[in-house]
Amino acid sequence: MSYPHLLAPLDLGFTTLRNRVLMGSMHTGLEDKAADYDKLAAFFAERARGGVGLIVTGGIAPNIQGWLKPLSGTMSMPWHVARHRKVTAAVHAEGGKICMQILHAGRYAYQPLSVAPSKIKSPITPFTPRALGTRGVERTIDAFVRSAQLARDAGYDGVEVMGSEGYLINQFLTARTNKRTDRWGGSAENRMRFPIEIVRRMREAVGKDFIIIYRLSMLDLVDDAQPWADIVTLGKAIEAAGATIINTGIGWHEARIPTIVTSVPRGAFSWVTRRMKGEVAIPLVTTNRINMPDVAERIIANGDADMVSMARPLLADPEWVNKARASRPQAINTCIACNQACLDHVFENRRASCLVNPRACHETELKILPAAAKKRVAVVGAGPAGLAAATTLAERGHAVTLFDRANEIGGQFNMAKRIPGKEEFQETLRYFDHRLTETGVTRQLGAEASVDALAAGDFDTVILATGVLPRPLSIPGADHRKVLSYLDVLHGNAPVGGKVAVIGAGGIGFDVSEFLTEEIPSPTTDIARWTKEWGVDMTIAAPGGLMPAQPEKPERDVWLLQRSAGRPGARLNKTSGWVHRATLKNKRVKMIGGVTYERIDDAGLHVIIDGQPQVLDVDNVIVCAGQEPNRALRDALLERGIDVRLVGGADVAAELDAKRAIDRATRMAAEI
């Protein structure tokens, strides 16, 4: 066995988990409607079949006041039980175990009935909560206990009490959000009473043979937070109250430190959990940015934790554990922590999915079935869309030939993987490389796919995944020697000077700016450098674990410009865009909107900003001003009577979108 510590059983006394992998809680959007529970059951059943040791559902509110949003998933009444039995039955049928997470949003709720320890509005939600009265606190504790009892009735193996991430329980624990003067506030002992009473009364109600996981906030990453000594005291008290497992919580949602995006180093917070080892005797779970078996094995072997929690990695690949057990890590479809189809979707009130696995949360709809009639299919372009189409078609039994002019697969991902903080994109290419071989796709790399060659190949269908062409700049001096395309820069085909203007502040412009200002290798690969860069104190000397950030010196002086007025980067992804903006701010990049471009000459880039003409004395002007679909082959192929389909950038070129490309390519291939 390649991962003996990770795959070892964990004896909890009254039950045994088959391995040390916990599928962490993550909202999917399927928890909120009874009509979606068949889909939710299929989603979790596939992960149980994939071998995970213990599953935790997305957050379920214990009462209406605890809703994250109106009509959120709730377990408070007997009639809620039936829908959940679908989930537990499906998981148990696959030999798995599952806990329901009980989450009370507190002041983080996006609904007007929100309550909190004190009447203090959250910086990330529009509603000011009502302060709970003394009887309200007692009723809320009762709601947690009742929810756990109902979860047991529904067949769950246990519950997870969400005590971190800045939700209601966390709000009771810190003076930051708890200004009470009664027995539930004031001293640290009083503030801890709320979670301790929840766990103590819950254990009395559910009995001894029911898992209670407590999600303990070990690193708040906000000011005026819990001191480490108080966190240890709480952990011991939670153990004494009857918890079975303590899971690690990292950061409040309002914290300005990234914790789960792709630029966070792998296993960046396991050191926090290790500090709790020895303080409690029950198993400890560590979490955040653990996405491959070697990382998980090392964490457990080193004694940092007894289990690892992974949510999105099991969204990306439900067979993650089975592949690890079979010593096939190269076959794992690795989570790249992009957040684009999971967290971004949830914050947009859409069903979650996964950029690298569009079947996630769509298992009952997007089925990859054997083809009724086998066809010969050519896929032109080995970028994300082409790779998804080719491997899905081949999996279904079609004879597939993949063409690309480059000598390697990857397309735009070969540039993305060079961006500091996006090194994980290489894992997707490793996965697809393995899949091409596994499914028997014929590769024709390093050669142009001409119309004649495609016509002579007797293909039933040709899928054009030929990507995009950069949109040229149309101002005087656009052909000046200072001007470079982002392709020149990211492929390393041209030297770049020390002072640079980047035209276009979309995703590519931000990527290029990060590429030009960050030292290689980036702090993403080094936890010590990364924590220093962002201001995370690994000694936790100050409550919350914050210290002054110490960004590394930027490699270049960069101006990031856009024509449209407003803040550059405003249209970046909701849950990760702020990280990119903060990264460039730390690198002293000058981000300016509302720019009029006049011309480029030896003096530099002539612009008008706020009505004032200026000359930016730069060595290079890098054009990231959009792209056009590359459909050069389509019309000629259609004239030959060939069935032609477009996917990826060749279909829609507006801002490169791998999520859309892989999703549409997979769905198209599932139907041919």
Image (spheres, helix red, strand yellow):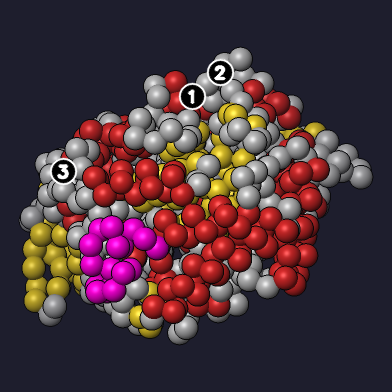
The kind of secondary structure element at disc 2 is: loop
The amino acid type of the residue labelled 3 equals: Ala
The amino acid type of the residue labelled 2 equals: Pro
Q: Which mark is residue 297?
A: 1
**What whole-number distance in Å separates the C-alpha atoms at marks 1 and 2?**
8 Å
**Does label 3 or label 2 sit earlier along the sequence?**
2
Residue 182 is inside the magenta segment = yes
Q: Mark 2 sits on what residue?
A: 4
**What whole-number distance in Å separates the C-alpha atoms at marks 1 and 3?**
29 Å
Q: Residue at x 52, y 59 (%)?
A: 201
Measuring from the top left, give residue 341's x and y in whole percent.
54, 56
Measuring from the top left, give residue 377's x and y in whole percent.
77, 40
Q: Residue at x 80, y 43 (%)?
A: 93
Measuring from the top left, give residue 426's x and y in whole percent.
46, 33
Q: Residue at x 33, y 53 (%)?
A: 251
Q: Say which quarter of the image contains residue 452.
A: top right
The kind of secondary structure element at disc 1 is: helix
1 vs 3, front mark:
3
Q: In this view of the protein, can residue 555 be seen by the observer?
A: yes
Neighbours of disc 1 within 10 Å: few (<14), some (14-19), many (20+): some
Q: Say which quarter of the image contains residue 64.
A: bottom right
The kind of secondary structure element at disc 3 is: loop
Q: Which mark is residue 541?
A: 3
Name the side, left or right, on which 300 lies relative to 526: right
Q: Which residues are magenta?
A: 178-194
The amino acid type of the residue labelled 1 equals: Glu
Neighbours of disc 2 within 10 Å: few (<14), some (14-19), many (20+): few
Name the side, left or right, on which 158 lies relative to 654: right
Q: Is residue 401 above or below residue 260?
A: above
Q: How many marks?
A: 3
